[in-house]
């Protein structure tokens, strides 16, 4: 083989490698998210490339589960090196035509060590959800019909952080115990800013994320409203230190409290549930199902 032939082959191989990177299909993103979520988040009908694409999002209870819910609209993404961060950092922009009319912008920082994903400052997302497709709507699984109710509405601002709202009923698609509880109400996920470090030992969180569950109800209780609750996940991201998890009741008839840790690979929470004075009879069935009874309280254990 002559030197010219070797150079030609090397050039062809490099060209093929570059083309594979540039035109990497969107289904690679779908596969990575499926693995990371242990089969609970499925990107169906993924189109485009790793760098710019879109797909339908389906929530499931994982492998073998019959619970599934396909969200209305499509999730789209764009990954590029613009945005003024310099170096190898890239900007990941997520949009959802129904749930995220205002884009959610994240900063992706690759490296030889841990990778990091940060919430970019200067973006706020606030959406009001409509009724989803799925077990309680018009379709389930990977169906692609229009949403059963009105499309969500959104408003964006200029403050830092991000907020996303969605119906608590969507949790039923994640299987046990949500499909039994059949919750309703509103979930609000917000953060003033965070960084997730993706290291071999798992995810590490720096900053905080807050989940507020408002006006929650369940088919297991005759009460029209159980209450409102807040879960705060906070971490330093230092070393192998786990993030702390705190559960508190804001108001309502069902009193929840608990604390635990999130390591990025596992959530561990211990707490209790009680009925507010005068609501014991109405919550008896629910307290028996959500934990182990210990007198008037029910012991909660996750992980």
Image: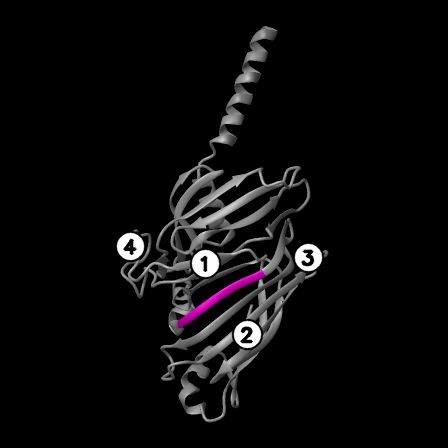
Spatial CA distance of label 4 from label 3 is 41 Å
* Residue matched to label 3: 237
In the displayed structure, 154 sits above or below 168; it is above
Mark 1 residue element: strand
- Residue 1 can be seen in this image: no
* Residue matched to label 4: 146
2 vs 4, front mark = 4
Task: Please tell me in which quadrant of the rendered image residue 60 appears.
Answer: bottom left
- Range drawn in magenta: 184-191
* Residue matched to label 1: 155
Q: Position of residue 62 (x, y in %)?
A: 43, 57
Residue 301 bears which disc, if any?
Answer: 2
Residue under the image location 46 percent in, 93 percent down? 278
Q: Which secondary structure class fits the magenta region best?
A: strand
Mark 2 residue element: strand
> Looking at this view, is 200 or 22 the one in front?
22
Which of the image's four quarters has the C terminus?
A: bottom right
Residue under the image location 36 percent in, 84 percent down? 222
In the displayed structure, 109 sits above or below 140; it is above
1 vs 2, front mark = 1
Q: Residues within 10 Å of mark 2 (few under 14, many from 20)?
A: some
Q: Residues within 10 Å of mark 1 (few under 14, many from 20)?
A: few
Spatial CA distance of label 1 from label 2 is 37 Å
Residue under the image location 38 percent in, 84 percent down? 223
Residue 66 bears which disc, if any?
Answer: none
Residue extending farthest bottom: 278
């Amino acid at each position: 083989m002559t030197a010219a032939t070797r150079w030609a082959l090397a050039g062809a191989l490099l060209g093929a490698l570059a083309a594979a990177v540039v035109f990497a299909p969107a289904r690679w993103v779908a596969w990575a998210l499926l693995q990371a979520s242990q089969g609970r988040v499925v990107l169906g009908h993924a189109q485009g490339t790793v760098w710019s694409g879109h797909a339908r999002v389906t929530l499931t209870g994982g492998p073998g589960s019959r619970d599934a819910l396909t969200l209305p609209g499509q999730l789209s993404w764009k990954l590029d090196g613009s945005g003024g961060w310099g170096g190898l950092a890239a900007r990941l922009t997520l949009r959802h035509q129904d749930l995220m009319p205002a884009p959610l912008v994240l900063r992706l920082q690759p490296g030889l060590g841990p990778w990091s994903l940060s919430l970019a400052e200067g973006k706020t997302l606030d959406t009001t959800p409509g009724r989803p497709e799925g077990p309680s709507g018009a379709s389930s699984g990977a169906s692609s019909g229009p949403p059963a109710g009105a499309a969500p509405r959104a408003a964006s601002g200029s403050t830092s952080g991000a907020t996303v709202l969605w119906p608590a009923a969507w949790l039923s698609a994640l299987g046990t115990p949500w499909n039994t509880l059949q919750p309703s109400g509103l979930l609000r996920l917000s953060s003033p800013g965070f960084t997730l470090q993706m290291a071999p030992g798992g995810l590490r969180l720096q900053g905080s994320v807050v989940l507020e569950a408002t006006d929650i109800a369940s088919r297991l209780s005759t009460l029209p409203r159980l209450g409102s609750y807040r879960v705060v996940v906070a971490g330093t991201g230092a070393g192998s230190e786990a993030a702390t998890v705190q559960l508190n009741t804001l108001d309502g008839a069902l009193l929840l409290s608990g604390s635990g840790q999130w390591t990025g690979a596992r959530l561990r929470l211990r707490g209790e549930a009680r009925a507010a004075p005068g609501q014991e009879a109405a919550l008896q069935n629910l307290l028996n199902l959500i934990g182990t009874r210990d007198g008037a309280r029910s012991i909660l254990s996750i992980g």
